[in-house]
Every structure is written in C-alpha cells, then in structure tokens.
Image (spheres, rainbow, N blue to C red):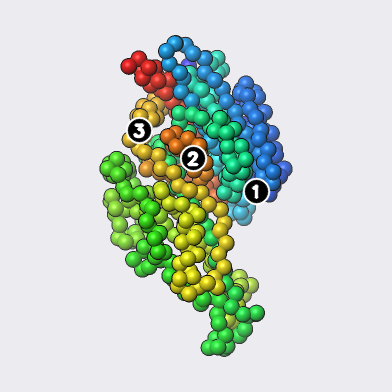
Amino acid sequence: MKDIFAYVDQNFGSMMAELRELCSFRSVAGDEEGLSKTRDWIVKKLDSVGIPWEEHKIENGNALISAGVKAEKDKDGYNQPTILFYNHYDVVEEGKHDLWTGEPFDAQVRDGVMYARGVSDNKGPLLSRIQAVEAVLAVKGKLPVNVKFLFEGDEETSSRSLRKFTEQEPEKFRELTKSDVCLWENGRRDESGRPWARFGVRGSISFDLSVETSNKDVHARMGTIIPSASWRLIWALSTLKGEDERIAIEGFYDDVMPVTPADEAILKAFPYEEEALKKKMGISGFLRNASGLQLKKQIYMEPSISVCGLEAGELYNGPRGIVPHKAFARVSFYLVANQSPEKVEGQLRDHLIRHGFSDIQVVARGANAPVRTPVDIPFKDIVMKAAKHVYEEPMVIEPTQLGGGPAIYFHRAWPDMPIVGVGPGNTNGNHHAPDENMKLEDYRASVKHMIALFYEMEESQIKASEK
C-alpha cells in the first residue's frame, strides 16, 4: 500500500481541484440544470478511471448511477469479496448566502479546510471513493476486491427515485447491490483525531400538522368566544410528549429493540464529550439528567420527537393582537430498530383522534425505516485494522448513524449485508447549515483508509479460505 499512498500524496492537489469542480454544481431539488451537470461530471469521472457505469432514469425523479469494477484473481481457492459504496449527489439548499463566509457553490480552502455546500454531504465522500479506486488502478493496474457504486439524486428529499427503482425493478436492484458489505454515505473524524465507523442507520418520518378553526383571524378581544387555532394546535402537541420526556403515543415503544450486551459494550467504550457539548450548547445538563452510559443509551438507542417549527398569526409580518384561525407545526420523529415509519404514522393519527383532535390535519413528509447493523461482526475488526494503516488514533465504533437514510431498501434486498458508514466528514462539518466544510487532511486520510480496506478485506478472505 505504500506506493499507492504515495500516489495519493503526489496527486492530492488535482484531487482537491476535482472536488472543487464537483461542488460548483447546484444540485438541489428542483434545479434540473445543476443536477444534470452533476450527473454528467460524475460519469465522465468514472469514464476517465475506466469504471463501467449505467444510468437508470426514473420518471419524475433523478436518475440513479450504478458502476463497478471486478478484481483480478491472484490466487485460486477463494472468491474476492465485494464492497458496495452508496452515496448521493444531491445536496440541500444553501439557504441565505449572507450567512456563509464565502459563496456556497464556489469552494474555497481556508486554513486547510474546504468550504462549500455538499463538500461533506455528500459529494466529498462520493468522490473520495472513486479516487481511492483510481489510485489503486493507477499504481497496481487491478483491484484486490470487487467494487460497486450506487449513487442517487434524491436522498435529501427522502430518496423517492431510489424507492421507485426498488419497486419497479427489484431484481435489477438486487443484482446491482449484491455485496459483502455496504459502505454508507459518510463517516467522521472527531476533534481528537479518531475516525468513526457507524453501524447502521436510524430511521425518520416527519409530519405537517395543521388546523383551521374559523374563516378568518379576528381581534384578540374576541378570544373568549372565537376558537383559536394556535391554542388548538398547542393542546394537541402537548399530548404527544410528557414532562418526563417520554413520547406519550400509545404503543410507540413496543417495537424498540432492547440494548444487547454487545451494544452496551460498544456504548461503554464510545467516547462522548459531555462537558464540551454542554458548554457548546450553553446548557447546564441534559434531559432527564442523563450522563455516562445512560446518556449514550438515550442518544443511540431511544427514538425521539421534535417540534421543528410552529406558525400562527404571521408574526413575521409584524405583531398583531389577534385570534389566529390557522396554525401549523412540523413534527419530526427519529426512529430506532425495529420501528416502522408507517406504523408510527398510524399511531399518531389514532392518538390524535383518541384524544379528541380529529380536526388536526396530518400530512406525512418523507420517511425512512431504521436499520441496525450488529456491532459484533467480523467486518468490525477488518475496518478497524485498515484504519491502523492511516490514523494515529484508534477507530471509534458508533452504534448507529444518528441521521436517517434509505438503508432499509438495501437491507430488504440483502438482510445479512452489513451497512457501515465511514468517510471524511468531521464533527463540525455543518451539514445542512452555512459554511459546510471538509478538512483536507481528513479527506486524504479517508482515501487512504478505503485503499487499506480493500487489501485488508482481500487478506481476510484469503485467510478464511485457507481454514
């Protein structure tokens, strides 16, 4: 691997130039030109590396891109393992430009950090994996393992095109994704220099709740006789969660998987900077006064509900003394295995009716089911061993990725395939926020980590075949 690592170092400047160019395209939902240019750039890059690819067009959606390279056998008696890389080329909207230090789609490097929308979520990780394959092929001319890629363009809007593809062409999807392990979209390196591997992906589902109590707003002096939409929605929301911080929807926790001894061992070893987080957030303590192991269980093994936004009375147009006739809220659930977003939707609707709020309108806004990857699997040792070739600090195993994602489609196709997130992100990467960023040295290390992983997977397969 020494020669391949040297190739990465020698060509790192051009790798970063490619990343800057990829980040220049505004591939947000609805920007057809930006999405199209991004796809075109990716397939041209695959062509330049010599990686065969296929585009899968989706009606009323963004095309998927699949690609792959097969290994050449050096020895008989074993089959090379296959790694599947999942990434997405769409990004969230940039938001207000004046909140960015620079322009969101003009990637700039300051003090060893590149800033741009999508540089970490998820164009940087996507490109780094292609470049890892490119480095091995440039130096060795062949790969030690089979590599597959699957890129989608609707992840930030609940992966609707990926879902359609799995429904319309299930056997094709199984063929494209058949692998020994799926490396999920990204990982991170913390402020202490430790790389993280995330085992599994949490689920999520969001809802728009709204109510209309009369035909129009009226003066606040009529508040004793005219029903208020804002109060109506507040009362409905108050039934969803108690002051004990437990979600009060009937049966909500029934499907939550218990914490296994292996999970608990990982949680105990998992470093969590409690005091640093309190200081950063300006708080004196966490909910339910949690700390230590209990705090980590709450974060990784319990579902959550958040009221992400409330609106009534149009106060952004100036204060008014009124009784609002319309009110709106966005409610988001983050789920853990084995919860079903569809079941949660039914539970929410039934709960509101049971508590006398049948007038509250409920609209689901995207959902992904959670997937748990067991931590006590052979791949854990392989990915950690590969990390030792690159990082000075030992790899940290994170029990699951806290954000949601479409891992359930891969899990349904291949229930035994581990799904693990590793990559060049950092703990202050500002995903979905102004000044999204990527540390250049984290990027370089991640490319090398993927290269090391190729060879460690091959070595593990050889040893297994000799037993």
In the picture, measured across the screen, residue 458 lies left or right of residue 291, that is right
Q: CA distance from mark 1 to mark 2?
A: 26 Å
- Residue in the picture at 57% in, 85% down: 226
Q: Position of residue 78 (x, y in %)?
A: 43, 16
Closer-to-camera residue (14/397): 397
Are there few (<14), some (14-19), or many (20+) residues within 10 Å of tag 2?
Answer: few
Nearer to us of marks 3 and 1 is: 3
Provide the residue designation for mark 2. Answer: 412
| Amino acid type at image mark 3 | Ile
Provide the residue designation for mark 1. Answer: 29
Are there few (<14), some (14-19), or many (20+) residues within 10 Å of tag 3?
Answer: few
Q: Position of residue 276 (x, y in %)?
A: 35, 51
| Amino acid type at image mark 1 | Ala
Q: Quadrant of the C terminus?
A: top left
Q: Position of residue 178 (x, y in %)?
A: 51, 30
Determine the secondary structure under disc 1.
Answer: loop
- Residue in the picture at 50% in, 64% down: 349
Q: Position of residue 318 (x, y in %)?
A: 62, 75
Provide the residue designation for mark 3. Answer: 377
Whichever of labels 3 and 1 marks the residue nearer the N terminus, that label is 1
Determine the secondary structure under disc 3.
Answer: loop
Are there few (<14), some (14-19), or many (20+) residues within 10 Å of tag 1?
Answer: some
Closer-to-camera residue (199/319): 199
Whichever of labels 1 and 2 marks the residue nearer the N terminus, that label is 1
The disc placed on residue 455 is none
| Amino acid type at image mark 2 | Arg
Q: CA distance from mark 3 to mark 1?
A: 37 Å
Closer-to-camera residue (32/18): 32
